[in-house]
Amino acid sequence: MPVYTVSQVTRYLKESLEQDSLLADLWITGEISNLKTYASSGHTYFTLKDSQSQLRSVMFKGGKGADLLLEGSLVAAHGRISFYEARGSVDFLTDLVMPEGTGPLFLELERLKVRLEAEGLFEPSRKRPLPRFPRVIGLVTSPSGAVLHDVCNVVGRRYPLVEIVLAPSQVQGDNAAPEIVSAVQALNEDGRADVIVLARGGGSLEELWPFNEEIVARAIYASRIPVVSAVGHERDWTIADYVADMRAPTPSAAGELVVPDGAALMQEINTWEESILRAISYHLVTQRQKVDGLARQLRAYAPDIDTLRRRVDDLAKAASVALSNRLSLRRERTSGLEMRLHALNPAATLYRGYAIVQKQPDGQVISTRSQVSTGEELRVTVSDGEFPATVGNGTSIEGNDGLSRKTRSRKPLVVRAGAKLL
């Protein structure tokens, strides 16, 4: 036979208890005892008991009706059975406590409120604002009741520009909840309405019960169009009121909520018109004063154009004279430099009958006799060209044209054209 661990058994007990649909949604009546509230967590631990049995219970922080948990008090508590594995105990997790003797319909209403609130259907952050100037109002109510007449009168008197589209529905009886759901869905599918109003007159809890049905709450929650709940009188609250984007205490009040007051609008428009005209007038006066002031400043700080024109003419003349003098000076200096460059030009010396003698092939210029020896090839440059030459025997240099000259000194070998090197 199999052998199980303690954890396996406790986990099986927990899953078995928490999967039981009966134990997941319980109302239990009993007497409170062993009440303990821990300030650090805000959770309350207690025992529900009767003359024969007792059940360990806990209400976590935020549970509804915690103020009714008093030692020795009789209560009706809603919650579910859970198994706490760490301690091996069966606990009743309580989420709602009501005074003993509360009717079953009211207990069911409170239970549903707790469950829907936990799911977020009452969350204020999801509620949408109503359009300020609706064009079409969808009305879900009985076509034969006084509510239709009251809403139409209020809306027509306050804002006759709006159109009312009636989605007829029963508002009392067993078939009312499905019809209300169908009407809300039909208005969403039609798409013309900017806001939907659920409306019916006052009545008992039983008469208003269709607006406490879960299917109605979920239809309101799923509506793409903002919903106003106007069910019963001011003291009557239904689940539809909690889910709707806005609650109106009465159907007539709903008519006032969904449309603006035309008379008040006209007064507001007139007030804004007067305010705008005053603002425009004040702005024009202020801007005109600013323009006048700027014009005066402009005239005060405007330059003397005539004087500036004369000053420009004087400066232009002075600049022209200075430029002419500078150009003349530059021209004279350029001419002098040109004459100096011409005097230093080697070609000018050659034109006066001198020649330049260079070794071959490196082009070394011959300035002394000691730089050459017999038989060396030379190149002689004169004013109109150059010709080759060869150093002869003795003390002369012969060219291929038969010219020769004895060299008597160590002066550079720059000679007159046609002369011999001696």
Image (cartoon, helix red, strand yellow):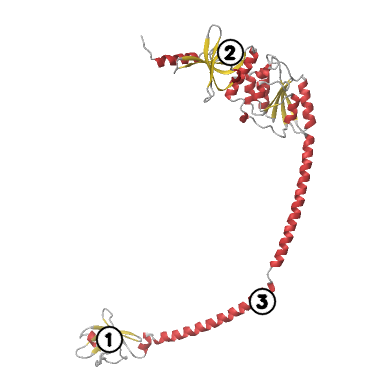
Give the residue at mark 3.
Answer: 310
Is residue 178 in view? no
Left/right of residue 47 with respect to residue 286 in the rendered view = left
User: Of label 1 and label 3, which has the lower sequence position?
Assistant: 3
Give the residue at mark 1.
Answer: 367
Q: Amino acid at mark 3?
A: Arg
* Rendered image: mark on residue 72: 2
Q: Pinpoint residue 264: horizontal percent, then vertical percent.
A: 78, 36
Q: Quadrant of the C terminus?
A: bottom left
Q: Quadrant of residue 239?
A: top right
User: Of label 2 and label 3, which has the lower sequence position?
Assistant: 2
Report how far apart the C-alphas of labels 2 and 3 lie in the structure: 113 Å
Left/right of residue 376 with respect to residue 46 in the rendered view = left
Q: Pinpoint residue 229: horizontal percent, then vertical percent.
A: 69, 24
- Element carrying mark 1: loop
Q: Pinpoint residue 14: horizontal percent, then vertical percent.
A: 47, 15
Q: Quadrant of residue 166?
A: top right
